[in-house]
Amino acid sequence: MSILYIVPTPIGNLQDITFRALSVLKKVDYIVAEDTRRVRVLLEFYSIKASLYSFQQYTEHKKTPVLVDKLKSGFSLALVADAGTPLISDPGYFLVKTCKALNIKVIPLPGPCAAITALCGSGLPTDRFCFEGFLPRKHSVRINRLQDLLEEPRTLIFYDVKHRIIETLQDMISVFGTERHVVLARELTKVWESIYGAPIGTLLSWIQRDTSKIRGEIVLIVSGNCLNSNVLSPKISYIMEILIKELPLKKVAILMKIMYGTKRNVIYKQYLNKKFNKVKK
Ligand code: SAM
């Protein structure tokens, strides 16, 4: 029927799949999957027989024309990821974009997504959030990305992997400071599911005391920057120090309020703290 279905699959617990997703997987001509061995486990669990076609991130551009030809010939396809929702830190964007450009029908189904599952269990604000996926691997690029997010007031969602999580938290501390609240959501929907939240510094020490706490799959939910909070972020604090060398305190307070929404009493408090430190030295 020339339809591309986008079908979310469980992120751990095989029961987390909708009736509609199962019925689509049963009826399509081909199931297009990242790792055909992994999807086979799900298909066997639900006794679904299907023709599988493999489709990885690095082959997406090469294989999209083949899939488009199948769709144009009247076949229906279901795109699935290894786990969760396709296209969300998973392949499929180029395929969907191409189908849209060619007026081929795309039907997305709702379903499991680790980011949304973690956010809902985090206890952090859910009214406005921003999904950042995986941070860049290269240290300097990762730091730049975090710096871009420093003033972001919405709740931040990151995907991560266990062998990089300590580095990620260390980088977050160097940019956000130690006090920002972070929730580590691990092995969601699985036997060892755990959701633990604390200020970043405390969370890092907690992990370093027992690295078994980062086994498995991880989502990090980071509190947004509350511009009106009583704590200045390291970057804003640094900018204030530069300004204070050039301008009277009153003018600095006016500028900081305009630029960052920082309350005047927070600026004065910070100023007094710094002066106090100087006297102590
Ligand atoms: N498309 C998927 C989705 O909708 O969530 C995400 C795929 S991405 C390649 C894999 C990342 O998702 C993992 O590194 C981890 O950050 C997160 N993830 C997937 N399953 C998870 C789970 N059960 N618990 C915690 N995080 C999970």
Image (cartoon, grey):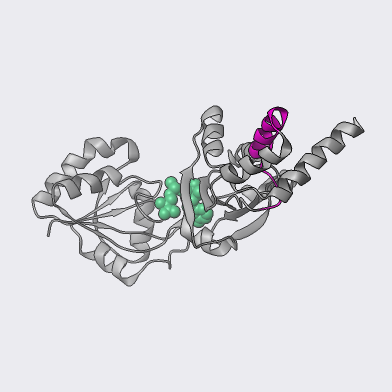
Locate residue 147: give its quadrant: top right
Q: Residue at x 71, y 32 (%)?
A: 244
Left or right: residue 200 compared with residue 95: right
In which quadrant of the rendered image does the N terminus lie? bottom left
Prevailing SS of the magenta stretch: helix
Whole-percent x and y of residue 224? Answer: 57, 51
Residue 165 lies in magenta, yes or no? no
Location of residue 103 with respect to 122 vertically, above or below: above
**Front in this rendered view, residue 120 or 241:** 241
As drawn, which residue projects farthest toward the right? 280
Please indicate whether residue 48 sits to the left or right of residue 257 in the image.
Answer: left
Q: Is residue 234 magenta?
A: yes
| Residue 154 place in picture, x, y as percent | 52, 53
Q: Nearer the viewer, residue 176 or 244?
A: 244
Q: Residue furthest bottom?
A: 19
Quadrant (top left, top right, bottom left, bottom right) of the C terminus: top right
The outermost residue toward the left is: 73
What residue appears at the point 48 percent right and 58 percent down from the top-left corner? 128
Which residue is depicted at the point 25% across and 61% down? 49
Vertical relation: 41 (above or below) 254: below
Q: Visible in this render: residue 189? A: no
Q: Quadrant of residue 46?
A: bottom left
Pinpoint residue 122: horizontal percent, then vertical percent.
58, 61
- All told, the count of numbered labels is 0
Q: Nearer the viewer, residue 28 or 220?
A: 220
In this rendering, does residue 168 appear at all? yes
Q: Which residues are magenta?
A: 229-247
Residue 108 lies, in percent from the top left, at 28, 59
